[in-house]
Image (cartoon, helix red, strand yellow):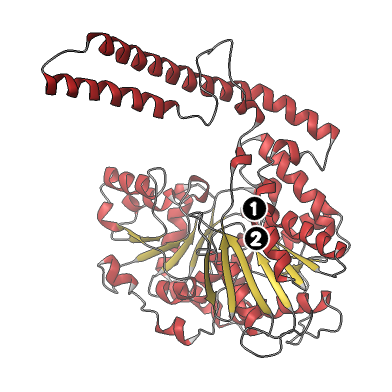
Amino acid sequence: MVGQAATDGKKSRGRVVMLVDNGVNGDSRVQKAARSMAEAGWNVTLLGLSPDGKDRSWRIGAAAVKLLPVRRELRRRRLHLKRSWLRYPFSCPPGSAARRRLQLAQARRADLRARSVARGRRFRVRGLVAKARLRWAELRLRHTEAAWASASEADRLGVRMSTAFWKTVRPTRCWRRLEPLLWSYELALGHTIDRLGPDVIHANDFRMLGVGARAKLRARAAGRDVKLVWDAHEFLPGLVAPNERWMTAHCAYEKEYAPHADAVVTVSEGLADLLVTGHGLTERPAIVMNAPVRTLTDEQRDTPLGDLRELCGIGPGTSLLAYCGGIAPQRGVDVMVEALPRLPGVHIALVSLHKGKTTADALTERARELGVADRVHALPYVPHWQVPEFLATADLAVSPLLHLPNHEIALSNKFFEYSQARLPLVVSDIRTMAAMVRATGQGEVYRAGDLDDYVRAVRAVLADPDAYRAAYDKPDLLENWTWEAQAEVLDGVYARVLPGVAPRFPQRTPEPATSETGVK
């Protein structure tokens, strides 16, 4: 299938099917990968999951995007599918319409009352029956809700026991019992993958690894040789998991299918080390960092760009600190608000989704309590290719991440976006980013979560920002931190796994780096 016609009529270097477990919009890494690989001559189709249960399709440059619905009935655990007959004998089966039955009983009683008024008479027997039905529906709803609550309580012990049992009996296959929802992704995407007949399957992260591996095995059974590239975005055991069952199941799933990957790419040297150790990889993963694009398309250049300071309502003489990214407790953004009373005249811009009381709204409320709400500006996301230019007028950028395994081992998206904006940085002392900032001199490092040390770092940068900006004048520093440089690596990975296909770009020799930080 290598060399089939591409969608634009030119000869393709091969068909690539990319898989991602989200709706594509908002995932800059997969968007950039799809567009750049299509520009490099690959026939690219990006398959994701529809957020509204409907088929969706569009194009990113020359790459086709398709979103397919995924059914989630397998999310329910077996413990939750049982009725609590002894404690709650009147509960409805899970999934039944207990609330609908109550509303129907209420509606029938209201209808009977309306008929009584209209006819000027009372329906005593029917009224008693309607009242009894209503009380019965209320009782069943109470029992149903109590049964579900007790199932959640029993889940704590029952799930721990079943998790330990299946982990012991089937170490790498236990996910089938513990997290059968993982099958749903294959049911949603598998048929389409097979129909597209790819030469390369590019599976983004752990959920799509299994989907891609099983598609590869089906192709082999049909006599086709399909290569699997696994793009590991995060260290799975380092994620904040909802419970032990979830972590055990997903780690087993990743462990089962990692050996099927013909090549692995990941985001940092530190994560590469962990993948080699954790999965016994015989070949070190290629590093494809999630850096910003530098060369824009005509469409991207024509997208209107707002002015950061104008949106904040401040002029060029006012100190402005920028943060771009998600807002959650583990990201440590609250330190930026808490510090404002000690940083007179300083404003902060939070470029994020700003959804939910527990995230951006909570910061806004805290700013009001501190009397600094007029200096906190919540701004919406901008397209990923606009971020560096949008932030460039700030005085410095902040990355306040707290100490978590995945924070320690990689340079974040925002680090590269801030750098391409040539902004001085204030970053927390998470290992890889702190080491890079200290090595380049592009900013100050403070102890994560330490308000006093954060204030010190901000004051130091604001006192002499040009000294930190000078770090970006070093030869090739920013050139290497572009998506264009990363796309060359990814293209080389595709070419390497396909016999007879040459890389489009000269292959770079990786610079030596320490295994701990990725910094020379």
Q: Residue 410: which disc?
A: 2
> What amino acid is at disc 1?
Asn
Image quadrant where one finds the C terminus = bottom right
Helix, strand or loop status at disc 2: loop
- The residue lying toward the viewer, choosing from 282 and 76, is 76
The residue wearing badge 1 is 406
Say whether residue 202 is visible.
no
Whole-Å distance between the Cαs marked 2 and 1? 7 Å
- Give the quadrant of residue 197: bottom right
In the image, 397: left or right of 373? right
Residue 496 drawn at (x, y percent): 82, 77
Q: Secondary structure at mark 1?
A: helix
Relative to the observer, which residue lies in front, 480 or 26? 26
What type is the residue that disc 2 sits on? Ala
Residue 265 falls in which quadrant of the image?
bottom right
Decide: marks 2, 1 in contact (CB < 8 A)? Answer: yes
Dot 2 crowding, Cα within 10 Å, few <14, some 14–19, many 20+: many
Q: Residue at x 41, y 64 (%)?
A: 381
**Vertical relation: 12 (above or below) 511:** below
Q: Position of residue 102 (x, y in %)?
A: 37, 24
Which residue is most to the bottom? 10
**The N terminus sits in image quarter:** bottom right
Q: Is residue 34 above or below residue 433?
A: below
Residue toward you, 343 or 416: 416
Q: Is residue 139 left or right of residue 226?
A: left
- Which image quadrant is residue 493 in? bottom right
| Residue 63 horizontal side relative to residue 172, left or right | left
Residue sitting at x 16%, y 19%? 116
Q: Position of residue 509 (x, y in %)?
A: 79, 80
In this orientation, does residue 166 appear?
yes
Residue 137 position, x and y percent, is 40, 19
